[in-house]
Image (cartoon, grey):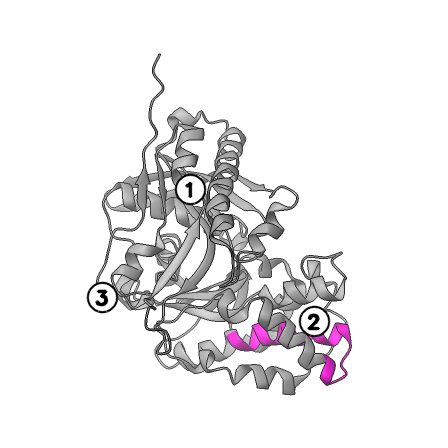
Amino acid sequence: MKLIGLMSGTSVDSIDAASVEIDERNGNITVSLCAYVEYPWPEGLRAAIHSLFTPHARISELSSMNFLIGEQFALAATAAAEAANWSLADVAAIASHGQTIWHAPRGSQSDRLFTPNTLQIGEPSVIAARTGCKVIADFRTADVAAGGQGAPLVPYADYILFRDEAIKRGGIAIQNIGGIGNVTFLPRTGRFDDLIAFDTGPGNMILDGLAQIISCGAQSCDRDGSLSDKGAVCHSLVQEWMDNPFFSMRPPKSTGREMFGAQAVQQFYKMAKARNISDADTMMTAVALTVESIVTSYRRFLYPFAELASVVVGGGGAHNPTIMRSLRTALQPVAVTTHAAYGINDDAKEAIAFALLGYATLQGRPSNVPSATGASRSVVLGKIALPTPLRA
C-alpha cells in the first residue's frame, strides 16, 4: 500500500513529506521509504505561522491560515509523489499531521471555560481536493477526547520500526530532538504494553530562538553547532531551568510552545545577559539544558524500571554535533547513535510515522498508546476527508 506522510513540527522548518510503501503479512509490517522531500514554506508564510502561536491570535487569520497551510501540504504531497515516481491515483491515502498551533491537554483551575484541547491546522479537505487523494488528518484529537494528552503519537511507529531490535539488543530509547524532545522506550520484552513514552522537554526550540536573536535573524537555528561549539556551560542557569515542575512531573506528559516557546526564549536570553555570559556560552548553556532534560528524564522515569542498552536520536538535533557530543558524554557507557545507523532517514522519521498512523486508521486499528498519552482506552486516530471525483 502506498501512503504519503506529512509533518510540520514545532520549529516550522519545512513540510516533511515521505512517500512510503507499507506491506503487512501475517501481522508483520514492513516499511519502505521510497522518497523524502523537505518542502519549503513560502517566504513570509513561516513568520505568519509563528504569529499564531499566541492566545491573542486573530480568529480571522487562524481560519485563513488553515486553508493556506492546506494548500502547501497538498503541494508537499504532490512533490513527494513525484519524487517517488508515483501517480497520485495510486496513493491509498495522505496522512497529514498538520501544523500544531496550540496544545493544552491539561486542565486549568483558573479558567472556568477551559477543557483539555489541541489544535492542528492545514485543512484536509483542501489537500483532498488538490490531490484527488483520501486524506487522514487531525490525529491527536481522538486521544484527547479519550482523556489523553494527544501526544506523543510516534511511539506506535517506533514500536513497529524498532521492536525486533529491542528484543535482539536490549532496551532501546528512541529520542526525537525536534522543537520539543520526546522519547519512546522499548524494553527487551518487545511487549507493546511495556512501552514507555513521554516528552522530555525543549529540544531545539530554545536553541532556535536564541540563534535568531544572537545572529540578528541571519540564522534560524544552531546549524552544525556553529553557534554553540565554542561556548561553556553556565551550570547555575541550567539548574534554575531544571527546577521547572515539568521536569519532575511523572509521565504521561507532553509539552510545546506554550511552555518552551517565544516567551521562554526571551526569558532564557534575559537571564543569560543578567549573568554576563557570552553569546556562545548562552547557546552552549541552551544545549546543556536540552541534554540535561533528556538525561534527567531517563534517570527518573526509565532507569528505575528497565535496562537501557542504546539510544537512537532523530530530528534536527541529530545533525547538531554539539548536542550529539554532549549527549554521548552524559549517557556513557550507553551507546548513542542515529536512525541512519538502522537504515532510517533521520529527518524523514516523523513523516514516516504519520504514514504508519494513517495506515492503521485505514485498517480501523487503534494506534494511540494509552500508557504514553494517559488516554482511558485505545482509539482509532484521525479524521478522513474524501475527494470528490470530477464529473466528465
Q: Amino acid at mark 3?
A: Ser
Q: Is residue 286 left or right of residue 250?
A: right
Residue 198 shows up from this direction:
yes
**Residue bearing the label numbered 1:** 123
Q: Amino acid at mark 2?
A: Met
**How many C-alpha atoms fall within 10 Å of the one at disc 2: few (<14), some, or many (≥20)?**
many
Asked which quadrant contains residue 15, the reply is top right
For discs 1 and 2, the disc positioned in front in the rendered view: 1
- Badge 3 element: loop
Q: Residue at x 61, y 75 (%)?
A: 329
Q: How many marks?
A: 3
Q: Between residue 272 and residue 365, name the one nearer to us.
A: 272
Asked if the magenta segment contains residue 344, the reply would be: no
Give the mark, 3 or 2, whose residue is nearer the N terminus.
2
Q: Between residue 106 and residue 4, name the one nearer to us.
A: 106
Alpha carbon separation for disc pair 1 and 2: 36 Å
- Badge 1 element: loop
Q: In the displayed structure, would residue 138 be above or below residue 211? A: above
User: What stretch of residues is rendered in magenta?
Assistant: 273-293
Alpha carbon separation for disc pair 3 and 2: 40 Å
Alpha carbon separation for disc pair 1 and 3: 28 Å
Contact check, label 1 and label 2, Cβ < 8 Å? no
For discs 1 and 3, the disc positioned in front in the rendered view: 1
| Residue 24 placement (x, y as % from top left) | 29, 41
**Residue bearing the label numbered 3:** 376
Q: Amino acid at mark 1?
A: Glu
Q: In the displayed structure, would residue 88 be above or below residue 104? A: above
Give the mark, 1 or 3, whose residue is nearer the N terminus.
1
